[in-house]
Image (spheres, grey):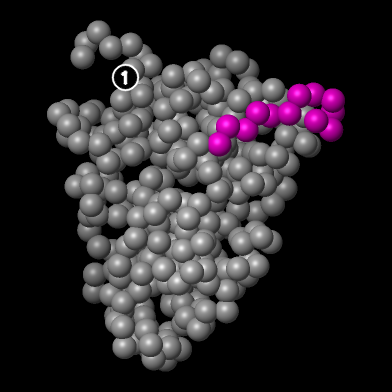
Amino acid sequence: MKTRSKVQRAVAGLMILLALGASGAGCGSDPAREGSNTSNTADISEGVQPYEAAVKLLPQSYKDKGELTVAMDLHYPPTTFLADDNSTPIGLNPDMARLIAKKLGLKLKFENTAFDTIIPGLDGGRYDFTATTMSPSAERLKVLDMIDYFNGGVSVAVSTGNPLNISNDDMCGRSIAVTKGSNAQLKHLPNVSEWTCTSKGKPAINGVTLPNIQEALTQLASKRIDGVFYDTVSLVWAETQQPNTFTILTPQVDTRSDHVVAVALKKGSPLTPALQKAIQSVLDSAEYKKSLANWGLESGAITEAKLN
C-alpha cells in the first residue's frame, strides 16, 4: 500500500469516491471520505404529506397501482449515486424523486440503468419518469415531456496544476472525455470545438466518449486523456472528495445555452399534469432547499417547474 504510485492512489480513490459501488478493506477509513455525505441514507421526504392539487390530477391507473418507477444512472455524485451501503440511492435526484412520489401519495421504485438507455425505457413504458440531471434538447423534446427542477453548468477538469496549459478557449487537438448520451457529447463539445477550433483553422477537439464520470476521471488520473468535460457540480464534488487529483478550469464553459435540468417522462403522458404540479410543490418546499444545501448545490435552485 505504501509503495503505490500517485496515479494508483488517485485511481483507487476515484474508484471508491465516484463509483461508490466497490467493496473491500479500507473503504471506511479513507480520509477523503471523512465529512462527506456518502453515508447519509436519511429519507428527506419522511413526514411529507400528499399535495391534494397534484393528487387530483393523478390518473386513476396510477392511484390503483400505488407506485411510480423512476429510472436513474446511479454513478453521478452529488446528484445521483449510491450511499456507502451500496444499495440506497442518494443525492439531489433521489431526493427529488422521493419528494415527488410523496406529493402524489405514491410509493417509489428505483431502477438503476445506464443513462443512454433511459429515454428508450421511458418511451417503451418500462419507467414512469426520470430525474437524472437530463437537460431539455430539441431531440429529447420530440419524445419526452420535460419539467424543470434545477439549473447547473458544465466545466472542464484537467490534471492537477494544468501542466498542459489547457483553457476553455483552447482545447484544440486535445483528448477530452464526455459521457455517453450526454448533452456534452451530443451538442456542447462539438459546438465548442467548432467555435474555438475548426472555424479558426485549428484541429478539432478529440471527444472521447466514456460510459460514466467514474471512468472519465480515472482515465484523467492515469493521463490517458487530457481533460473531462462534465457537469460543474459533479466535478466540484469529486474535487472536494479527492483533493489534489485534478484541477477544474474556471470560469464554466460558455456553451451559449442555459443548463437547466428536468424531470422527464414519455411525451403526452397522462401523468405529466400531476407530475408538474407535484414538482412545483417540491420547488416551493423547505425540503427542496434542504436537499440542495445537503449536496452543496444551493446556487442551482429554481422557482418554476416549467413544462418545456
Density class for disc 1 (Cα within 10 Å; few <14, some 14-19, many ≥20) is some
Q: Which residue is farthest left?
A: 25
In the image, 290 versus 185, the foreground residue is 185
Position in image of residue 139 (x %, y %): 66, 60
Q: Quadrant of the N terminus?
A: top left
Q: Can see residue 249?
A: no
Position in image of residue 169 (x %, y %): 71, 30
Position in image of residue 51 (x %, y %): 37, 83
Whether residue 20 sits left or right of residue 235 in the image: it is left
Whether residue 28 sits left or right of residue 59 in the image: it is left
Position in image of residue 7 (x %, y %): 38, 16
Q: Quadrant of the C terminus?
A: bottom right
Q: Which residue is farthest top?
A: 3
Q: Does residue 206 belong to the magenta stretch?
A: yes
As drawn, 22 above or below 300: above
Image point (35%, 55%), residue name? 112
Q: Quadrant of residue 154?
A: top right
Identified by mark 1, the residue type is: Arg
As drawn, 161 above or below 271: above
In the image, 47 versus 137, the foreground residue is 137
For the magenta stretch, what is the residue range? 198-209
Whether residue 183 sits left or right of residue 31 in the image: it is right
Q: Disc 1 marks which residue?
A: 9
Q: Can see residue 272?
A: yes
Image point (20%, 36%), residue name? 23
- For numbered disc 1, what is the local secondary structure? helix
Image point (53%, 56%), residue name? 134
Q: Does residue 210 belong to the magenta stretch?
A: no
Count of numbered circles on the image: 1
